Amino acid sequence: MRTVDQSLGELAVRFGLVLRGDPDLRVSHVATLAGGSAGALAFLANARYRRQLEATRATAVVLAAEDADLLHPQPAAEPGVHPTAVVSSRALVPRSAAVAAFALVEDGAEIGERAFIGPGCVVQRDARIGADTRLLARATVCAAVRVGARCLIHPGAVIGSDGFGFARDGGAWAKVPQLGTVRVGDDVEIGANTTIDRGAIDDTVIEDGVKLDNQIQVGHNVTIGAHTAIAACTGISGSTTIGKRCMIGGMVGFAGHLTIADDVAVTGCSLVSASIRESGSYSSGIPVAGTREWRRTVAQLRRLDRAPRSAGSRNPRSDE
Amino acid sequence: MRTVDQSLGELAVRFGLVLRGDPDLRVSHVATLAGGSAGALAFLANARYRRQLEATRATAVVLAAEDADLLHPQPAAEPGVHPTAVVSSRALVPRSAAVAAFALVEDGAEIGERAFIGPGCVVQRDARIGADTRLLARATVCAAVRVGARCLIHPGAVIGSDGFGFARDGGAWAKVPQLGTVRVGDDVEIGANTTIDRGAIDDTVIEDGVKLDNQIQVGHNVTIGAHTAIAACTGISGSTTIGKRCMIGGMVGFAGHLTIADDVAVTGCSLVSASIRESGSYSSGIPVAGTREWRRTVAQLRRLDRAPRSAGSRNPRSDE
Amino acid sequence: MRTVDQSLGELAVRFGLVLRGDPDLRVSHVATLAGGSAGALAFLANARYRRQLEATRATAVVLAAEDADLLHPQPAAEPGVHPTAVVSSRALVPRSAAVAAFALVEDGAEIGERAFIGPGCVVQRDARIGADTRLLARATVCAAVRVGARCLIHPGAVIGSDGFGFARDGGAWAKVPQLGTVRVGDDVEIGANTTIDRGAIDDTVIEDGVKLDNQIQVGHNVTIGAHTAIAACTGISGSTTIGKRCMIGGMVGFAGHLTIADDVAVTGCSLVSASIRESGSYSSGIPVAGTREWRRTVAQLRRLDRAPRSAGSRNPRSDE
């Protein structure tokens, strides 16, 4: 048995692992899950041994990310409909699903096997929630929205609110009916208080494996490609298509009717106002400086368009 | 009968119409609503013929925006109070109004004729909701807030939360009571998870016909002029007044205590930190570039305030 | 008796007071609280006289901010559990607390003395709510979150949603379980639709006296120091620590893993992408200009990194 005696923090850094737990804990040797004791570092490489996870006494276990939940299982919701929930007799709720207190499932809605409709959630008429999907609390899934399997929807999210569509009507605005819906793929996560508008005619589409952080706004007829991840507070205007496997920072603004290629990264606080045709990393955020210094910079910036075209022009003019 | 044989898309572009439906459908002739059949383009110009809309067999109908809903009517909510709703005996709810499951209407609240208080909505004490206004789901209308007629309030909106008012009290903050309320005019739309704070002393005012997209923040004592439209994620700091018929893009930030003229447009991701006295279009958003290129630009930007005042100065100095 | 005859507005400006009420009201003399009548300006300097506030007839009273609420008391909620609320038999709710309609208090949750759990609020398993804290309506406090005493939590706030943690797993994302929680100190205010994520391993921490405006996003493992105030729509990425007594403007974006010193001010619409070691005021927001002028400025900005290093270089080149 080889002795390692290293901290978990050191091991995680050295091998590029995501560490969950105390980085100061030390391990001294490698062992099997079943045989591990204090000081042991165990491995789970074969799904057959998953059951040993719960009972292992090893100090740490190296395992695939998708197995990590096995160490920290979410308490499963009891199947069944809470006595205070309201479920339409014209809705489909399988016996394996759970509908919590003050949840509402309207006419024509269909809930998948083992799905969880959390407390205070509203699933409106004809909406469909896939198998094993969990609406944690106080989420709203509007009429006719389709949500795939194994999704996780955080409190306060709204899926299927009207898109922002108005036509000038004299001095006022006439509402353009929003007749499409939202289609959410499988394995999608939608953050707290994020809002996704339904399409005007066609649908808004969130493809498989997309991860949306909190307080994101997705406009009508947007498409977000598979496995794209978007950080909090970003807003995407109507009819923009974002490619697959993109990584979008927080507080990014997308104009409408754009096409963003696959594998694009956009750093936080940027503005995307034109389509991006090539994968790569894009930015327009400006980091802070001292306020006084920054004001001078802004003053100089304003003077740029009054400056001579060529810095070394032969015919200089004072621009003061 | 003149034959046109054009696609709806072509017609919409040519005549500047908002098209709802399949742009590839083709029409070959013009007909009345009653007489229209496949291939017919019909018109609704006189309200007397509205009833024919539902039965027309024309391929497309040209009509005013405000009539378009007739083609796609919202299912009317059944009047009445859902058995799970809680309505104070000291609230006024007319027979024509609908109060949905898990909705709460507190003491002194007054609900207008044919109004809809959706599932999970909270209408707090002394609030007033106008005729034909619909709170779709899980909206909160706080104490003493007034909402006009024919408004549409999307899920998760909060109208009348406290303004952000604190006074320094040694090293801590003392709360300044927020004693005003919010007055929302007629025909206002308020998007999902949008928040509107009550005034500190006077009221926050949203005038008639204003359209607010999702996740907008309106600070205390703000006034938004009639028929102004604001896109998602914009924030308006306290005591700012925005004029009438303005069009504000998404993710715009307004400082407090400003006055913005009528008919002002602000493009997305801009910062408005001073009053705007003249109508026109204003911007300060910077579109993305490649991240590496952008970093060079920012580095050069920082050097601007160290640069010589006149680019063609006779007394050049190296600023390196 | 000295006659002053000044408007409240004039007095407030002259003495730097926060005025609540009509600035045009005039006072003519100074009097005690008990003896004050129309035209009197009274003072409350000694807590012993607080009871006289309610009955005073003085036109205006000068008092400490923390006493101002005494003039405008919030109607106290009746203690007790509303018949429609659902409170687990394994939760602790003292008799002095109030649980409103459609509120849910899950297993193991503990509610403090005189706390108010407003309508539609969800307090999940093992969460703890301190004495005198008020959840106004439709707020969600997730599992195991701790909220201190005398906090005020506005409608739609979500405390303890999962942090945004995913690990690359081939072309997809594997969720990193979020095993920490959120600890909120005493006297904290949390605005409408603000979201605070639970920590991944350690906790997210909001220290005593912090004031958060509406629609703020706080990422996992963030710490916000005591008495810091943050304006609406600001987003703080994971693992960033903000110091004490900071004042952060609206719509500011913080990158992750930063350390911000105590007593830092950041003006609105700025991006903080590196740690700030010294107190002071920081900015990077650019105020709007006319759109046409702004476009020219952006075009010039883009050319900066192609410009000669020294503006007065001896070897000028045309960059056109």
Image: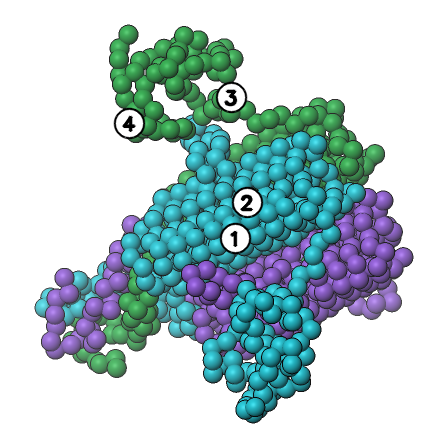
Chain colours: A cyan, B green, C purple
**Secondary element at tag 4:** helix
Q: Are marks 1 and 2 in contact (CB under 8 Å)?
A: yes
**Is the C terminus of chain C in the top left, top right, bottom left or bottom right quadrant?**
bottom left
Task: Name the image quarter holding residue B148.
Answer: top right
Residue highlighted by disc 1: A188
**Residue B315 coordinates in the image, percent (x, y):** 18, 78
The chain that hosts pointer 4 is B
Same-chain check, marks 1 and 2: yes
Q: Is residue A21 left or right of residue C312?
A: right
Amino acid type indicated by mark 4: Glu
**In the image as oriented, which residue stretches furthest toward the right?**
C95
Label 3 – label 1 distance at C-alpha: 35 Å
Residue highlighted by disc 2: A147
Q: Are marks 3 and 1 in contact (CB under 8 Å)?
A: no
Label 4 – label 3 distance at C-alpha: 24 Å
Same-chain check, marks 3 and 1: no
Residue pictured at 76% horizontal, 45% vertical: A82
Label 4 – label 1 distance at C-alpha: 38 Å
Q: Which is more foreground, mark 2 or mark 4?
A: 2
Residue pictured at 22% horizontal, 81% vertical: B318
Residue pictured at 57% horizontal, 84% vertical: A30
Residue B146 or residue B28, whichever sits in front: B28
In this rendering, is residue B282 above or below C317? above
Q: Is residue B68 left or right of residue C123?
A: left
Q: Residues within 10 Å of mark 3 (few under 14, many from 20)?
A: some
In this rendering, is residue C23 above or below C45? above
Residue pictured at 77% horizontal, 49% vertical: C103
The chain that hosts pointer 1 is A
Residue highlighted by disc 4: B10
Q: Which is more foreground, mark 4 or mark 1?
A: 1
Q: Which is more foreground, mark 3 or mark 2?
A: 2
